[in-house]
């Protein structure tokens, strides 16, 4: 009989000299000194048996010797170590992120038997073994989950032991009801990039290289649980070597559903007027050659097609702009790596972290004054920023060229593959038709894209990420809600549309869908909504829409309500509620909400957009607003900012002298008609829009008189602002109202700008002073609201929402000054400030009653 008490190693732990282990002895975990085992010769691992004598592990033994020792203990009346079995039900983002392989390896390390399985709600693991090992397993679930996982809850229950041996990954189980979280698409990881460049690796230059830690997820999922048969990778049978990796717990591709290789994976194909070319490497070589010669290509990616050209080739970029009829709207640019990015833009540590994040958004960055890579002027005219992103697939990396390869193009324009106003193209035959007028060739592959998903866009302000478009890499991750809501569908607004489904304490927002001004976009909205319901299992009992009677999203909700209640929500109230919700406010205390945007329907029939609301989820009081000004001709004044400038000049009592840029920009005949409209009110609607005020000032100083895309004038005005100019200069007036809501009067600002223009002050300084005036007004209005102590509540929280607050200068100046006045400032951090975040606010308002 062996000398000592048998115990099984649970894990090695820190101690003096690292000579301790947590060992399960008769069902009790003990810290045991293992220094006598001479670890240089005898490495100890979890699951190993040892004999313990006087607090020391004195001998490593095999299972038979341990059994002998336990039998001896039983003969002396001491109990054998007992076993327990527990079930762990894990919810959250736990499918498609390597969670089952993690559970498998953890159980094996702790010598536990049992199983793990995906089901519709998440992951279910059953483990059996000594109590200490099972406790250690539970702790590792909480503290050592895979990096891409988001564990929301773990329900633990004791169940009867079965005496089974070994640990298995069972086939996934399908079920009805609440679903697990689906993973977003994840940008290519460093390990895969290394293999892509390694000539000795079997996935050398494989365009579709992925592993458990990266690759497509959301865009290929056709159903849950997340397994290969429920993705578009079901079309590709794994070869023997891929299957071996897929089934090997020690491999990085263990249960990686998109796993493939050149022998069994998707294939590239190049097409142009000269015919077809097959073979991955030949296709890539030809595409690189064509791009270097100035061609414009349609390249099929993860979430749709991109239109691609050499970003340094002015002829190619300007031709793409002409074909796509894009006006001056900036293009995004992709470069090979961080070093190349630094050759074009200035990047701080927070921006570097965002740029290299696995979500791989387009990041708005300030251009260098002395760039080593000089992008063509037509890439992003009239802006100091450039939207930059890094490769997020093997195909992207190969197009730009691997390390050591001469680049065909050092930077590539990457813009959504669509015509203006249409959703991104995903179907191959559709691409041949819809993109034919735009491109010189197609580089495509045969993996189906089930869900269209545009690139996300973000920027960093004061070290904090502010989303501008939330799509690839972010969708469909949920937002936690501050209170329970019934099953709800919110349809958002018409611009930058996203929809949302919600139930319980979560809301799931769709990927970016686009502007609802095209039949194809409305169809894409319906498809996105259905896919979101499938992924989440939410069956909406209530629908919510904007209260604008002319919105297509509102009409869609009315047409699809099927007898369910349809709640309408005021646009700017939803902006404020959205920010409140993402910050977890429960609504018991109202906030001071600034909702500044271009257009929103007001209950008085006016077009709102410069609103200061004292709000909670149940309602709001309009404390102040930008003074009404006539909007003549509807969209005509949105597309031609000089019309808004003339309207503001008239309201401020400034003559339309032709020395002023907007007066000179307006044709004589149009000016005559406009004067009549503003004088009589014919064809006019009042607006309090802050977005239209930015438009008016942009035209007044002469930087933009006509817009080809939303917020163009405001973006250019922000871009020209002098970073070093004094902020002193202009002040808004206040007009008190008998109704309790004061009007913020821009007339003093307008007259001040006119005086400075005529005095020859530089436009850059005027722009800087205008931005400072708006931020000063925000702070002064917040202080007035706090001092008024409305609703008998101390108002200390300020919410900034609406598309105008995507202006980095305005956000930075306003939030800094508000904090200096003692306010808590809430910005949109999870969702965009623009209408893409509106659906969340709609859900919360509709559910608050």
Image (cartoon, grey):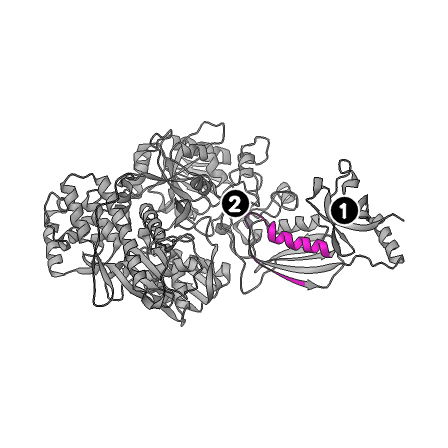
Calculate the distance from the C-alpha at mark 1 to the C-alpha at mark 2.
37 Å
Q: Nearer the viewer, mark 1 or mark 2?
A: 1
* Residue where numbered disc 2 is placed: 215
Q: Nearer the viewer, residue 800 or 336?
A: 800
* Residue where numbered disc 1 is placed: 48
Q: Quadrant of residue 350?
A: top left
Figure check: 682 above or below 725: below
Q: Secondary structure at mark 2?
A: loop
Q: Which residue occupies 17% across, 53% down?
A: 747
Q: Nearer the viewer, residue 764 or 386?
A: 764
Looking at the rendered structure, the number of numbered marks drawn on it comes to: 2
Looking at this view, name the residue that lies furthest to the bottom. Answer: 563
Figure check: 567 above or below 325: below
Q: Is residue 272 left or right of residue 771?
A: right
Which mark is drawn over residue 734? none
Q: Quadrant of residue 797?
A: bottom left
Q: Secondary structure at mark 1?
A: loop
Q: Which residue occupies 27% across, 47% down?
A: 772
Q: Nearer the viewer, residue 438 or 570?
A: 570
Task: Look at the image and give the residue range highlighted in magenta.
Answer: 131-157
Figure check: 623 above or below 800: below
> Dot 2: within a 10 Å radius of its alpha carbon, few (fewer than 14), some, or many (20 or more) residues?
many
Q: Which residue occupies 30% across, 57% down?
A: 783
Q: Is residue 843 left or right of residue 739?
A: right
Q: Position of residue 325 (x, y in %)?
A: 28, 44
């Amino acid at each position: 009989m062996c000398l000592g008490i048998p115990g099984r190693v649970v894990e090695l732990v820190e101690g003096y000299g690292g000579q301790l282990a947590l060992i399960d002895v008769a069902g009790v975990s003990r810290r045991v000194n293992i220094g006598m085992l001479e670890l240089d010769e005898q490495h100890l691992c979890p699951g190993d048996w040892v004999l313990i004598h006087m607090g020391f592990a004195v001998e490593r033994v095999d299972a038979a010797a341990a059994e002998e020792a336990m039998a001896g203990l039983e003969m002396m009346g001491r109990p054998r170590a007992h076993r327990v079995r527990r079930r762990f039900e894990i919810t959250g983002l736990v499918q498609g992120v390597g969670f089952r392989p993690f559970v498998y390896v953890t159980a094996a390390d702790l010598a536990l038997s049992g199983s793990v399985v995906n089901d519709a709600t998440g992951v279910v693991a059953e483990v059996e073994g000594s109590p200490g090992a099972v406790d250690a397993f539970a702790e590792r679930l909480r503290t050592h989950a895979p990096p891409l996982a988001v564990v929301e809850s773990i329900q633990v229950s004791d169940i009867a032991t079965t005496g089974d041996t070994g640990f298995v990954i069972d086939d996934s189980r399908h079920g009805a009801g609440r679903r697990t979280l689906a993973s977003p698409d994840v940008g290519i990881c460093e390990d895969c990039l290394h293999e892509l460049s390694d000539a000795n690796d079997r996935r050398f230059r494989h365009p579709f290289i992925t592993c458990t830690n990266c690759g497509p997820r959301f865009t290929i999922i056709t159903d849950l649980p997340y397994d290969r048969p429920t993705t578009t990778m079901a079309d590709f049978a794994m070869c023997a070597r891929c299957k071996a990796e897929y089934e090997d717990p020690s491999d990085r591709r263990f249960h990686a559903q998109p796993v493939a290789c050149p022998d069994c994976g998707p294939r590239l194909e190049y097409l142009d007027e000269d015919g077809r070319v097959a073979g991955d490497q030949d296709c890539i070589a030809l595409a690189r050659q064509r791009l270097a010669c100035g061609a414009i290509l349609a390249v099929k990616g993860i979430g749709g097609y991109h239109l691609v050209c050499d970003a340094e080739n002015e002829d190619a970029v300007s031709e793409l702009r002409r074909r796509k009829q894009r006006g001056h709207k900036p293009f995004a640019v992709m470069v090979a790596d961080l070093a190349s990015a630094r050759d074009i833009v200035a990047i701080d540590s927070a921006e570097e972290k965002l740029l290299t994040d696995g979500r791989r958004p387009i990041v708005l960055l300030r251009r260098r004054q002395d760039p080593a890579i000089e992008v063509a002027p037509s890439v992003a005219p009239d802006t100091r920023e450039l939207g930059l992103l890094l490769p997020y697939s093997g195909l992207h990396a190969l197009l730009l060229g691997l390390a050591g390869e001469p680049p065909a193009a050092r930077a590539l324009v990457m813009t959504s593959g669509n015509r203006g106003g249409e959703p991104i193209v995903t179907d191959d035959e559709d691409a041949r038709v819809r993109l034919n007028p735009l491109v010189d060739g197609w580089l495509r592959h045969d993996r189906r894209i089930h869900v269209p998903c545009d690139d996300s866009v973000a920027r960093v302000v004061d070290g904090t990420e502010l989303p501008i478009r939330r799509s690839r890499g972010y969708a469909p991750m949920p937002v936690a809600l501050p209170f329970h809501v019934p099953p709800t569908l919110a349809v958002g607004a018409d611009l930058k549309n996203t929809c949302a489904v919600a139930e319980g304490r979560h809301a799931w927002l769709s990927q970016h869908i686009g502007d609802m001004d095209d039949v194809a976009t409305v169809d894409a909205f319906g498809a996105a909504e259905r896919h979101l319901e499938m992924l989440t299992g939410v069956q909406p009992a209530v629908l919510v829409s904007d209260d604008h009677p002319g919105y297509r999203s509102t009409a869609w909700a009315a047409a699809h309500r099927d007898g369910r209640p349809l709640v309408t929500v005021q646009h700017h109230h939803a902006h404020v509620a959205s920010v409140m919700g993402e910050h977890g406010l429960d609504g018991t205390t109202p906030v001071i909400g600034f909702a500044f945007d271009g257009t929103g329907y007001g209950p008085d029939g006016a077009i709102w957009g410069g609103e200061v609301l004292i709000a909670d989820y149940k309602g709001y009081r309009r404390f102040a607003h930008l003074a009404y000004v006539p909007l003549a001709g509807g969209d005509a004044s949105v597309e031609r900012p000089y019309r808004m400038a003339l309207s503001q000049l008239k309201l401020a009592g400034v003559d339309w002298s032709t020395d002023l840029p907007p007066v000179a920009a307006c044709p004589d005949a149009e000016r005559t008609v406009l004067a009549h409209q503003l004088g009589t009110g014919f064809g006019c609607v009042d607006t309090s829009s802050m977005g239209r005020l930015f438009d008016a000032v942009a035209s007044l100083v002469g930087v933009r008189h006509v817009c080809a895309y939303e917020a163009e004038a405001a973006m250019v005005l922000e871009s020209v602002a002098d970073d070093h100019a004094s902020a002193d200069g202009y002040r808004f007036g206040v007009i008190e109202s008998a109704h309790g809501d004061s009007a913020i009067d821009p007339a003093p600002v307008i007259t001040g700008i006119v005086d400075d223009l005529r005095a020859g002050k530089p436009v850059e300084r005027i722009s800087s002073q205008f931005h400072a005036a708006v931020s000063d007004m925000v702070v002064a209005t917040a202080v007035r609201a706090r001092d008024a102590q409305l609703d008998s509540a101390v108002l200390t929280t300020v919410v900034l929402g609406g598309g105008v607050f995507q202006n980095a200068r305005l956000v930075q100046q306003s939030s800094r000054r508000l904090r200096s006045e003692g306010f808590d400032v809430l910005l949109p951090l999870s969702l965009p400030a623009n209408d893409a975040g509106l659906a969340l606010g709609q859900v919360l308002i509709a559910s608050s009653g």
